[in-house]
Amino acid sequence: MFGLGTPELIVISLIAFLIFGSKKLPEIGAGLGKAIGSFKKGIDDIEDVGVDLKKSLPGVKEVTAVKEQIDRAKDITSVLGK
C-alpha cells in the first residue's frame, strides 16, 4: 500500500486524531468511505457504457471474429514451429 508500513500508519492516525479530534474522525471516515464507493460505482458504470458502446458499433463482431482467427492461426504456427 504505497510503501506504508504499520509504524507509518500509526503515526498518520495519531496526527489525524490530534488535528481533527475523536468526534470528527468517524465522520471523516464515513465520508471517505462513501466517496470511494461512489467513485467505484462511477468507474463500473463507465466500463458498462464502454462495453455497450462496443457491442453497438457496426463491424465490431466481424473484427472480433477476425482477431480470433488470427489468434488461432498463431497458436497453430507456434505448435508447428516446435
Image (tube, rainbow, N blue to C red):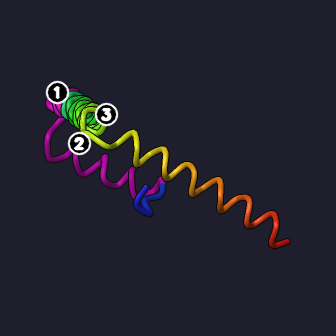
For label 3, count other residues whose C-alpha is less than 10 Å away and answer few (under 14), some (14-19) or many (20+). few
Q: Which residues are magenta?
A: 6-33
Q: Residue at x 55, y 48 (%)?
A: 68
What separation in Å lies between label 1 and label 3 (alpha carbons)? 42 Å
What separation in Å lies between label 2 and label 1 (alpha carbons)? 12 Å
Magenta segment includes 17: yes
**Helix, strand or loop at mark 1:** helix
Q: Amino acid at mark 3?
A: Lys
**Residue 30, image x and y in percent?**
22, 27
Q: Amino acid at mark 1?
A: Glu
Residue 55 is labelled as 3
Q: Residue at x 70, y 59 (%)?
A: 75
Q: Is residue 29 visible?
A: no
Position above or below: 51 against 73: above
Mainly helix, strand or loop, the magenta region? helix
Are the residues tagged 3 and 2 within 8 Å (C-beta)?
A: no
Q: Quadrant of residue 27?
A: top left
Residue 82 is labelled as none
Q: Which residue is at the front of the view, 13 or 5?
A: 5
Are the residues tagged 2 and 1 within 8 Å (C-beta)?
A: no
Judged by depth in the image, the label closer to the viewer, 3 or 2, is 3
For label 2, count other residues whose C-alpha is less than 10 Å away and answer few (under 14), some (14-19) or many (20+). some
Are the residues tagged 1 and 3 within 8 Å (C-beta)?
A: no
